[in-house]
Structures are given as structure tokens and as C-alpha cells.
Amino acid sequence: MTIHATATEPVTASLLRTTARCLPTGVTVVTSGLGPDVHGMTVNSFTTLSLEPPLVSFSVRHDARIRGPVERTGGFVVNVLAAEQTELARWFANRNRPLGAESFAEVRTEDAPVTGGVRIAGTVGYFACRAVRFIELGDHVLVVGLVHECGAREKARQLLFVDGELRAAQDRPAEPPRAEEQ
């Protein structure tokens, strides 16, 4: 069954969410803060914006707990989760988990970047950023960051969110490369 809005019917939050679930997104954990005030949150609204200068963004609800640490410290880390990190994605999406450093007690981490926040071990990649702009949009805020440090693991499978579920990226291309791509 197809569900849609017409020009005479408004697009509801439910319809927008249902339609957006058709688009696979990467799954990240955004971290910010220092020491006992560090915080993390699962985010799938991450995207790169510009190569020159190197800019990225993510969006969260206005009342998201990650917003405070990002605004106070001016820095954040986007950890791109690997396929085997579904439990981490669920953990940092759980609003009932402990706050602060306690929420990282069972999480393996790597060296802290200069921007603050936490690098999570075993991820596909990371972007350590300084926040350069907060843009209020509807019920969300878009956070734009200047990338100061980043890195990626080769041949790691990414964790995806599609159809309302966490899934592993496939190891094969959707179709063979075209002659001009080889």
C-alpha cells in the first residue's frame, strides 16, 4: 500500500518519518565534552558539506542532551559505526543510560582528539571537529563543524539504518562498474 500526501493534504511528521526510513543512512555516535562531562548520542543525520574548507554537519532535536556539551566546549567527534557495533548504537540511543563519563564505562576508546569528545575504538572512521555554526531549523538544530582531524579504517563494513532497523552494509557493489568507471 502506498501512503502519500497530496497538495491539499499536509505532510505529517509520521508520513515524513515513514518516507525517510526508505533512505539508508550511516549510523554515528557524536560525542562532546571533557572528563566527567563527556556525552554521546547516536545520530544518523550526519553528512559532509564541503571539501574546501572541510565541513560536516549533523542535526538533533533542540532539546537533545548532546547540544549542551557541543555549545559549551565548541568541539565534537563523529564516530562512524562499524557493522559489529549495533549494541553501541542502541546504547547511545537509550535516553535512560547513565549520563557523563559513566555512559562510557564499558566503551573502548582511543586517544582523545584536540577538539574534545571521545573517539570510540573499532569504528569505521571518525571526524574531530570544531563547531562553527548552529542553525535553528524547525524542531531541530543543524550543527556545522570544521574538521580538524579525521581517519578511516580500510575494508570495514559500515552500520546502516534503513526501514527502521540497524543493518550491516553489504560487501559487494549493487551492480558491476561501468566501463568508464574502470
Image: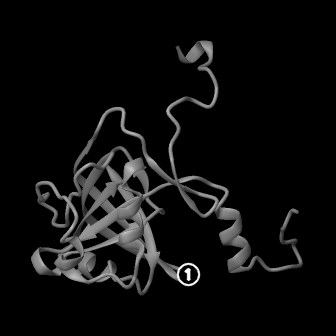
| Nearest the eye: 90 or 76 | 90
Q: Residue at x 31, y 33 (%)?
A: 154
Picture residue at 44% right of the left edge, 84% below the top: 62
Q: Quadrant of the N terminus?
A: bottom right
Left or right position of 27 against 121:
right
Q: What is the quadrant of residue 141 in the picture?
A: bottom left
- Of helix, strand and loop, which one carries label 1? loop
Task: Provide the residue designation for mark 1.
Answer: 138
Horizontal arrangement in the rendering, residue 122 relative to residue 2 (left or right):
left
Q: Looking at the picture, does residue 124 appear above or below residue 64?
A: above
Name the spot of residue 94 as percent of width and height, x first: 40, 77
Q: In the image, what residue occupies the spot 63% across and 55% down?
A: 23
Classify residue 102 by image quadrant: bottom left
> Based on the displayed image, in which of its 4 quarters is residue 12 positioned?
bottom right
- The x and y percentages for residue 90 are 42, 68
Q: Position of residue 6 (x, y in %)?
A: 87, 71
Q: Is residue 53 visible?
A: no
In this rendering, would 121 be left or right of 55?
left
Three-letter code, disc 1? Gly
Rendering coords of residue 8 (x, y %): 89, 78
Q: Residue 60, can we see it?
A: yes
Q: Nearer the viewer, residue 153 or 167?
A: 167
